[in-house]
Image (cartoon, helix red, strand yellow):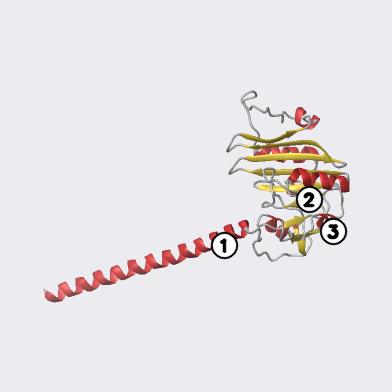
Amino acid sequence: MRKLVVAMIILVVVFLAVVLLHSLKRNILSSGEVRQQAKQEISKLLNIPERINFDARPDRPVNFGYKCQWYAVGTTDTEAVAESFGLEDLQAANWQTGIAGAYGGYYYVSPPVKGWTLVVNSHMADSGVPGENNPIGVVKRLSAQYGEAYYFGTHRVVEYHAWIKGVQGEIIRAYGYVGESSETLMDEGDPTKEEIANDLVFAESHADYGRVPHEEDVIEMASLWTVSPFLEDGDYETGTGLAGTAKAHE
């Protein structure tokens, strides 16, 4: 009888040890995940992009657009546009790795696409950020230099949706909305013919029209004004762009 009791005690101890080991393993894994997430959040706050191994081998364009921001500049000079943004630590990057970097905080300056150079970065300043990096100021500057420049931005978490058109240093149209706060960030210039024809005009008081912009509207505006970010749907040549970081003071 005593032997049976001892055996049962041993089994219970072994079982508890196994449970404890599994628990420790989960905690260690969770701690690693927390550290990785914290690292990513700190990188965003300090404007430090996540480390990306860029590939310079030319490839075909890949899709982007959702939860992202980008400029379309009326030129095919990739290097000149990178210089206009004052980017540092430039590296040759194909579409696959360049767009991956753009979602990690890098600026990706694309090879030419139908006469446009695209500058993509999901973390760059949006329309709610004051200062020289506000998209309105950037579009003015770029359009003065290259003739035409556009900005598009969308993020589904806060329901941020915006588009800006600039020609010869003047803002022709700028619209931005944040659904989380039901706030119109900007509504400058008359609605363009593309907005009117495609029912993409939204009232200052959204109760008037009963609808608000969505991320698909940003994608459509990009298609109407410049080129769709869903580039895999088109027949484009292979190419290599440039990836870089903003200067420290930005």
Q: Which residue is mark 3?
A: 79
Residue closest to the far bottom: 3
Q: How many marks?
A: 3
- 194 lies left or right of 50: right
Q: Amino acid at mark 3?
A: Glu
Q: Position of residue 188 (x, y in %)?
A: 75, 33
What distance separates the C-alpha of mark 1 from that of mark 3? 31 Å
Q: Amino acid at mark 2?
A: Leu
Question: Quick one: SS at disc 1?
Answer: helix
What distance separates the C-alpha of mark 1 from that of mark 2? 28 Å
Question: Quick one: SS at disc 2?
Answer: strand
Which quarter shows the N terminus?
Answer: bottom left
Disc 1 + disc 3, Cβ < 8 Å: no
Q: Quadrant of residue 147?
A: top right
Q: Position of residue 168 (x, y in %)?
A: 88, 41
For discs 1 and 3, the disc positioned in front in the rendered view: 1
Residue 118 bears which disc, if any?
2
Residue 39 bears which disc, if any?
1
Residue 27 visible: yes
Q: Nearer the viewer, residue 190 or 238?
A: 190
